[in-house]
Image (cartoon, coloured by chain):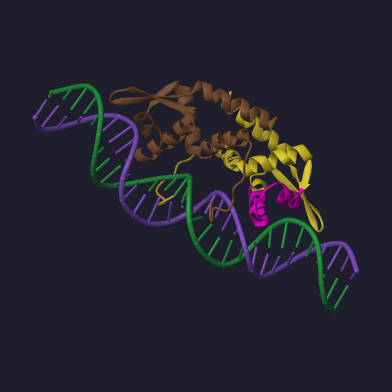
Chain colours: A brown, B yellow, C green, D purple
DNA sequence: AATATTAATCGTAAATTTGCGATTGATATG
DNA sequence: CATATCAATCGCAAATTTACGATTAATATT
């Protein structure tokens, strides 16, 4: 956003949908989610083996997915187990379904 | 993307889904699509009245939606009538539905 | 032919995204 | 207590996105 002039009030649903869409707007994140779904859950380290991407980059993608609410991390020291956030996943499903109906 | 090191081969479906998601990743574009759906079709000028955004900015958003294949423009000189691209809309619907199932 | 209307494009600026390596902090293990 | 492992965070650089005003191109209208 440039000169901070734009200042629209969007419908909450638009903002929510856009946020979920943004989380899904990178192929790596899409595939991370597919992997997570296939495996039920997984650790960051597993993903480093699956994707030829730096660990820090994967960590960043996970952070975005977590911020969007699509995944959640459970502490299993010294690892972290990531799973899909079922509730928000369902929320996203309904949002996209209604929107694209 | 920085040093152009990253070079993954993604599943085509991931790339496709990410591309549609990217098109939907901005609230303004979401609302443009909602407006378009409500009105069946509309002209760029109509949107300028609906959204408090510069004409050039709206034009850019329309361009992105068009590039993503979600809308199409029909020449009605001197105007351009934009409609939802039903075929790709359906494609996106199926993609998101399968993915979020 | 001159003017008005419409919408794309250009040029620019700021913010955000994407990626990496290096470092850090936290927890386990020897 | 020293060391190893794991994953987040920092710092940086390049690319992309988002926004604007100004200009341009194309078509209508007078």
Q: Residue at x 71, y 51 (%)?
A: B48
In this orientation, does residue A52 appear? no
At 34% across and 23% down in the image, what residue appears?
A75
Left-right relation of A69 to B85: left
Q: Is residue D11 above or below residue C26?
A: below
Instruction: Provide the residue span drawn in magenta.
Output: B43-64
Percent coordinates x, y for residue D26 in the rendering: 78, 64
In-image side of D24 versus C11 (left or right): right
In percent of width and height, residue A39 lies at 44, 22
Q: Does residue A39 sit above or below A23 in this rendering?
A: above
Res B90 quadrant in image: top right
Q: Main secondary structure of the magenta part?
A: helix
Q: State yes or no: residue B61 in magenta.
A: yes
Q: Is residue A42 left or right of residue C26?
A: right
The front one of C12 and C28 is C12
Q: Does A85 lie within the magenta span? A: no
Q: At which x and y percent is residue A81?
A: 37, 24
Is residue A9 visible to the viewer in this orientation of the structure? yes
Place of residue A84 in the rendered image (x, y in percent of width and height, measured from the top left): 47, 24
Which of the 4 quarters of the picture holds residue A100?
top right
**Count of all numbered marks drawn on residues in the image:** 0
Q: Residue at 65% x, 51% y: name it.
A: B53
Q: Quadrant of residue B71?
A: top right
């Amino acid at each position: 956003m440039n000169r901070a002039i734009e200042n629209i009030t969007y419908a909450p649903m638009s903002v929510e949908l856009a946020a979920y869409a943004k989380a899904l707007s990178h192929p790596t994140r899409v595939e991370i989610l597919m992997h997570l779904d296939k495996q039920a859950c997984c650790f960051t380290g597993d993903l480093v083996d699956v994707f030829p991407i730096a660990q820090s980059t994967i960590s960043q993608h996970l952070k975005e997915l977590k911020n969007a609410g699509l995944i959640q991390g459970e502490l299993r020291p010294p690892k972290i187990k990531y799973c899909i956030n079922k509730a928000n996943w369902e929320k996203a499903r309904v949002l996209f379904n209604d929107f694209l109906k």
